[in-house]
Amino acid sequence: MMDAQGLRQIEGDAAAPRNFRYFDYVMTAFVTILLLSNLIGAGKRAVVDLPLIGPWPFGAGVLFFPVSYVIGDILTEVYGYAHARRCIWAGFFAIIFMVFMATVVVALPPDAGWTGQAAYESVFGQTWRIAAASVAAFWAGEFVNSYVLARMKIWTAGKALWTRTIGSTVFGQAVDSALFYPLAFLGAAGWTPGQVATVAVTQWVIKVTWEALLTPVTYAAVGFLKRREGVDVFDRGTDFSPFAKAGSAPSG
């Protein structure tokens, strides 16, 4: 069936085994931004001086990490839940390898003439607690985000894209922030429960705000990719289990 834009509507199970022209590029961007956000910004607590409020702490990674959610929205909207699920698992294992590689490299004995070990440990020496929190929060948050968007696309009959990109981010980022900061920093030195709660809520608000501000970019990217791919995917009857294989029949 063709829609008003000349796109052929297909079901999620038909899209799952399909090879798309631009999917690999979008997946690469998704994993790259995900890794860089976790590597560079996740552990730093920054502060901004807000008018009438004063100093307000926030996680530095929030400036770029939400872009991965925008790309996650694009993946689900354009390619369907099954392709988004594939990207989430790719990102999941990429983060695990990043943590493993950083641990091994930091632990290697430095050469006597090299003076950068302390700085290297400071930048790349994530604790296993932070790493585990990051992996868990990413996995749960991204799957919630993708599930909500795919469901809302059916409810809205593919209209009002902004409602599902923002709506899915509200839920997905809430899960991400609610898991990451307590798991990573609650009870840790220099972090009070109040600071953990403040930063977690701030992260959520900023991420959702970023999603709203980037709505025109999302619209442009979704429109471009749908026109190039020639289809519009609706996840009716899709198996939404994170562990389902592509093209599998729906459970239940």
Image: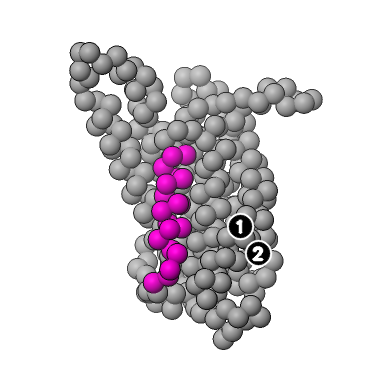
The image shows residue 40, relative to residue 217, as above or below, that is: above
Q: Can residue 49 be seen in the rendering of this structure?
A: yes
| Residue 243 forms part of the magenta stretch | no
Say which quadrant the C terminus sits in: bottom left
Say if mark 1 contacts mark 2, CB within 8 Å: yes
Residue farthest to the right, as pictured: 52
Q: Amino acid at mark 1?
A: Thr
Looking at the rendered structure, the secondary structure element under dot 1 is: helix
The kind of residue on which mark 2 rests is Leu
Crowd around label 1: few <14 · some 14–19 · many ≥20 (10 Å): many
> Which residue was labeled with disc 1?
218
- Residue drawn 46% across and 45% down? 33
* Magenta highlight range: 19-37
**Splitting the image into 4 quarters, where does residue 111 fall?**
top left
Residue 78 horizontal/vertical position (percent): 53, 67
Residue at 37 percent across and 19 percent down: it is 119
What residue did someone put label 2 on? Answer: 161
Return the residue found at the far bottom.
1
